[in-house]
Image (spheres, rainbow, N blue to C red):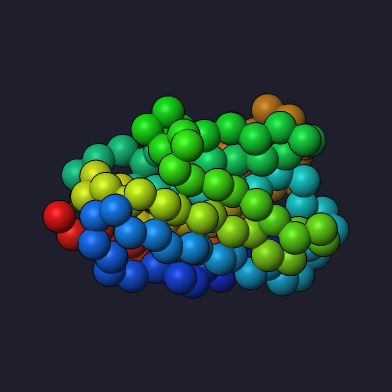
Amino acid sequence: QVQLVESGGGLVQAGGSLRLSCAASGDIFSINAVGWYRQAPGKQRELVANTSGGSTNYLDSVKGRFTISRDKVWKTVYLQMNSLKPEDTAIYYCVADPSVYGVKEYAYWGQGTQVTVSS
């Protein structure tokens, strides 16, 4: 089992930056894929960024603004968010999975952290 705890959310003005962190504990050596989802009120959940097997992918709307990274032993995963826009407002969830490729449903989820971008 893996436990994920996010931090770093908050209120920021448009154009500002935030860095989300996700601390993993438990069987961290089983993790091969990590990512960040977000869900805004009344909207579907969307995968913002993910990385596994040397490949990194981003939602089109965040490309060039967000960067996902991790430390070498998967203990912490980060999401650096720059040039934030009001439409980035959502609850952000850290996710992880033992699979390297083709993850459709991540096995492990954090509790979420609120990001609010004011205009």
Q: Quadrant of the C terminus?
A: bottom left
Tell me if residue 64 comes above or below residue 22 in the rendering.
Answer: above
Number of residue marks: 0
Q: Which of the 4 quarters of the picture holds residue 4?
A: bottom right
Quarter where residue 77 is shown: bottom right
Q: Is residue 40 visible?
A: no
Identify which residue, 34 or 80, lies in the foreground. Answer: 80
Q: Nearer the viewer, residue 81 or 46?
A: 81
Q: Position of residue 117 (x, y in %)?
A: 25, 58
Rendered residue at 63%/69% (across/down): 23
Judge left or right: residue 44 versus residue 53: left
What is the residue that sits farthest to the left in this orientation? 119
For the N terminus, the image quarter is bottom right
| Residue 105 shown left or right of residue 1 in the figure | left
Percent position of residue 28, x then y: 78, 62
Q: Is residue 71 left or right of residue 18?
A: right
Is 48 on the left or on the right of 87, as rendered? right
Q: Position of residue 18 (x, y in %)?
A: 42, 63
Q: Residue at x 31, y 38 (%)?
A: 44
